[in-house]
Image (tube, rainbow, N blue to C red):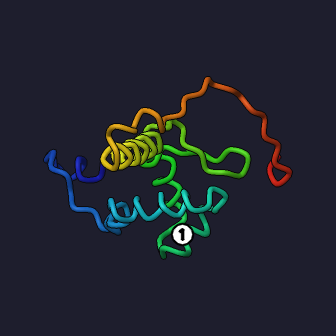
């Protein structure tokens, strides 16, 4: 507003001072994700202390980039896309190893079941 009153009508974006956002790198995001997978109850403050980055940035990465939220004191994915992909890749690799060991006996080693819901109560959580 002040520049406009002085007669400066340019539309270029002026250089702004401040910190660069170098914390949000794929490596940092992977490190945070690995820490959460190791301990679902880990706090954002603890993650920030371990990696030496601001807690606000950790929260932004967890909620924005990893798309996770805290539920009953545990980090859980909002959409299980990333975790489901990893689990499915691991399962497929295991199945491929079994098949490569003995292709003729492959089908006899598979076990299939129907979907059954089991209730699990953990006193440590709510």
Residue at 30% from the left image edge and 67% from the top image edge: 17
SS type, badge 1: helix
**Label 1 sits on residue:** 48
Task: Give coordinates of residue 89: x percent, y percent.
Answer: 38, 44
Using residue 116 as the reference point, say whether residue 10 is left or right of it: left
Using residue 29 as the reference point, say whether residue 43 is left or right of it: right
Q: Nearer the viewer, residue 62 or 30?
A: 30
Q: Nearer the viewer, residue 31 or 18?
A: 31
Task: Give coordinates of residue 32: x percent, y percent.
Answer: 48, 62
Using residue 89 as the reference point, say whether residue 109 is left or right of it: right
Residue at 47% from the left image edge and 44% from the top image edge: 83
Task: Give coordinates of residue 108: x percent, y percent.
Answer: 46, 34
Residue at 44% from the left image edge and 37% from the top image edge: 81
Number of residues whose C-alpha sits closer than 10 Å to that of mark 1, classed few (under 14), some (14–19) or many (20 or more): some
Task: Give coordinates of residue 76: x percent, y percent.
Answer: 59, 45
Q: Nearer the viewer, residue 76 or 103?
A: 103
Residue at 61% from the left image edge and 69% from the top image edge: 46
Name which quarter of the figure residue 22 lies in.
bottom left
Residue farthest to the top?
114
Name which quarter of the figure residue 24 lies in.
bottom left
| Numbered marks: total | 1
From the viewer's perspective, is residue 43 above or below residue 99?
below
From the viewer's perspective, is residue 13 above or below residue 121?
below
């Amino acid at each position: 507003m002040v520049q406009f009153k002085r007669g400066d009508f340019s539309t270029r974006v002026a250089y702004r001072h401040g910190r660069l956002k170098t914390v949000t790198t794929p490596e940092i995001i992977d490190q945070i994700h690995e820490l959460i997978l190791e301990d679902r109850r880990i706090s954002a403050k603890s993650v920030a202390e371990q990696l030496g980055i601001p807690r606000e940035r950790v929260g932004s990465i967890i909620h924005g980039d990893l798309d996770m939220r805290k539920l009953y004191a545990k980090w859980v994915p909002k959409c299980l896309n990333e975790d489901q992909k990893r689990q499915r890749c691991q399962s497929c690799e295991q199945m491929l190893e079994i098949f490569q060991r003995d292709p003729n006996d492959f089908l006899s080693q598979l076990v299939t079941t129907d979907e059954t819901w089991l209730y699990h109560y953990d006193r440590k959580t709510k």
